[in-house]
Image (cartoon, rainbow, N blue to C red):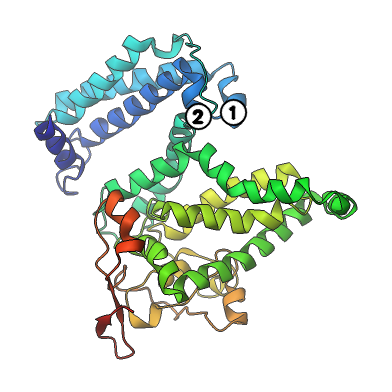
């Protein structure tokens, strides 16, 4: 089994020259993507109490939802057969075909829901698939047709780790939401005297509320972000995010779970206690998912003027640069003028970082990176650019 998995990974990570159009690689890749997506959705429909997100009920109630799953599975079968026909290596097509047949055996798009006793918690398998497909189909074509680094592959170094981070942050959405919103709920329950102020905020035009949320959250995130760079113990958590040596839309998912909880708690605390409309907050959450993917994406374009006022990929890539000049700069997420206000703005005209990552030996894999803040013996750069032991 391990040997088969290794062959599958090698085929997915094939060099660009081997996976050209007509080689069967693209047919096999999309067959595998659709098969996994279809199987995940079938599992979610069969065990809704365990694997569905309540906020996506409106999507599952859409009359064409099951038809869409059926078409996805049919497409996976057809593409798997095409890949088997065209490609000397059969592992992609065979794997996709086996997963698609597994989905069919569970009941396919017509699967009936089992109703086991609920545990009171769920894992957002449907949210993971919807989010992966939406952001993947949004940014993967951009990275292919307007890349910053043309030599970087879709399945680049460390893509498995980042996909796993993406999986954790989406499937454990309920747990993360509970931990991050608990402080806000406590404050709301004990501040009934704020109701007049909250009503005033809620009465503002929707667009005005959304703009206030953007600016307020970015100001909070700026100082939160900067603190995680300056406090050695907190840096141990944030170093996991900066350990990515390639930048693409998936790299933004690499965040230590403790930092995710603290970041969401800090930014949501004022926004969920000051009376902003629920639709504004929902729109902001959706926006930040897309925006974060864009900032980390392998997308070209210098945007020398725009990058001084609105965060662009090049602006944020400098925050991840390995060069000494890229250390402790560009902390803002939306508005670079916040960095200008506090002296941390850095966007040399027309230049990108040469390399990404940090001069610390961060372990590979989720387990080692989870323990890293407590076992850290990494290094930092001294003023001359050399390495010295971390304090």
**Could you tell which of marks 2 and 1 lies nearer the N-terminus?**
1
Tell me which residue sits at (66%, 59%) in the image: 214
In the image, taking residue 338 as reference, residue 356 lies left or right, namely left
Q: Which residue is mark 2?
A: 122
Question: Is residue 204 in view from this perspective?
Answer: no
Q: Residues within 10 Å of mark 1 (few under 14, many from 20)?
A: some
* Residue at the farthest right position: 196
Q: Residue at x 60, y 19 (%)?
A: 61
- Tag of residue 31: none
Tell me what residue is drawn at x 48 percent, y 13 percent.
116
Looking at the rendered structure, the secondary structure element under dot 1 is helix
Point out residue 371 in the picture as x, y percentages from the top left corner: 32, 56
Considering only vertical position in the picture, is 222 above or below 81?
A: below
Please name the residue shown 44% across and 10% down the image. Answer: 111
**Residue 308 can be seen in this image:** yes
Q: Position of residue 144 (x, y in %)?
A: 34, 51
- Crowd class of label 2 (few under 14; some 14 to 19; many from 20; radius 10 Å): some
Q: Nearer the viewer, residue 216 or 149?
A: 216
Q: Check the picture and name the quadrant holding the C terminus.
A: bottom left
Cα distance, mark 2 to mark 1? 9 Å
Label drawn at residue 54 = 1
Disc 2, SS: loop
Describe residue 225's horizontal placement relative to residue 89 as left or right.
right
In which quadrant of the rendered image does the N terminus lie? top left
Q: Is residue 127 above or below residue 262?
A: above
Residue 381 figure quarter: bottom left
- Up the image or down, 31 lies above or below 303; here it is above
- CB under 8 Å between discs 2 and 1: yes
Q: Does 195 sit left or right of 260 as displayed?
A: right
In the image, farthest residue toward the bottom: 384
Q: Nearer the viewer, mark 2 or mark 1?
A: 2
Figure quadrant of residue 148: bottom left
């Amino acid at each position: 089994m391990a040997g088969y998995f290794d062959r599958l990974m090698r085929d997915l990570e094939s060099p660009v020259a081997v996976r050209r159009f007509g080689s069967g690689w693209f047919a096999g890749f999309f067959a595998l993507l659709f098969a996994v997506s279809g199987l995940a959705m079938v599992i979610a429909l069969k065990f809704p109490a365990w694997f569905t997100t309540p906020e996506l009920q409106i999507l599952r109630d859409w009359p064409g939802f099951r038809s869409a799953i059926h078409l996805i599975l049919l497409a996976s079968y057809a593409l798997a057969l095409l890949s088997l026909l065209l490609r000397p290596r059969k592992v992609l097509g065979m794997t996709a075909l086996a997963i698609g047949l597994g989905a069919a055996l569970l009941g396919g798009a017509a699967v009936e829901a089992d109703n086991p006793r609920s545990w009171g918690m769920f894992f957002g398998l449907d949210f993971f698939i919807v989010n992966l497909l939406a952001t993947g189909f949004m940014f993967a074509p951009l990275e292919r047709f307007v890349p910053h680094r043309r030599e970087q592959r879709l399945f680049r170094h460390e893509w498995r780790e980042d996909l796993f981070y993406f999986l954790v942050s989406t499937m454990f959405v309920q747990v993360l939401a509970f931990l991050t919103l608990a402080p806000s709920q406590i404050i709301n329950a004990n501040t009934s005297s704020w109701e007049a102020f909250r009503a005033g905020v809620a009465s503002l035009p929707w667009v005005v509320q959304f703009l206030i949320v953007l600016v307020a959250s970015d100001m909070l995130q700026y100082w939160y972000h900067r603190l995680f760079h300056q406090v050695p113990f907190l840096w141990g958590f944030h170093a996991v995010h900066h350990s990515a040596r390639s930048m693409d839309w998936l790299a933004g998912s690499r965040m230590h779970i403790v930092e995710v909880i603290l970041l969401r708690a800090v930014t949501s605390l004022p926004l969920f206690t000051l009376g902003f409309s629920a639709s504004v907050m929902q729109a902001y959450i959706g926006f930040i998912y897309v925006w974060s993917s864009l900032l980390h994406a392998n997308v070209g374009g210098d945007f020398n003027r725009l990058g001084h006022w609105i965060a662009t990929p090049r602006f944020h890539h400098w925050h991840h640069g390995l060069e000494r000049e890229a250390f402790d700069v560009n902390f803002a997420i939306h508005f670079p003028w916040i960095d200008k206000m506090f002296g941390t703005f850095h966007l040399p005209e027309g230049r990108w970082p040469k390399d990404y990552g940090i001069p610390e030996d961060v372990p590979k894999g989720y387990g080692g990176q989870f323990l890293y803040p407590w076992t850290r013996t990494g290094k930092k750069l001294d003023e001359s650019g050399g390495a010295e032991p971390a304090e």
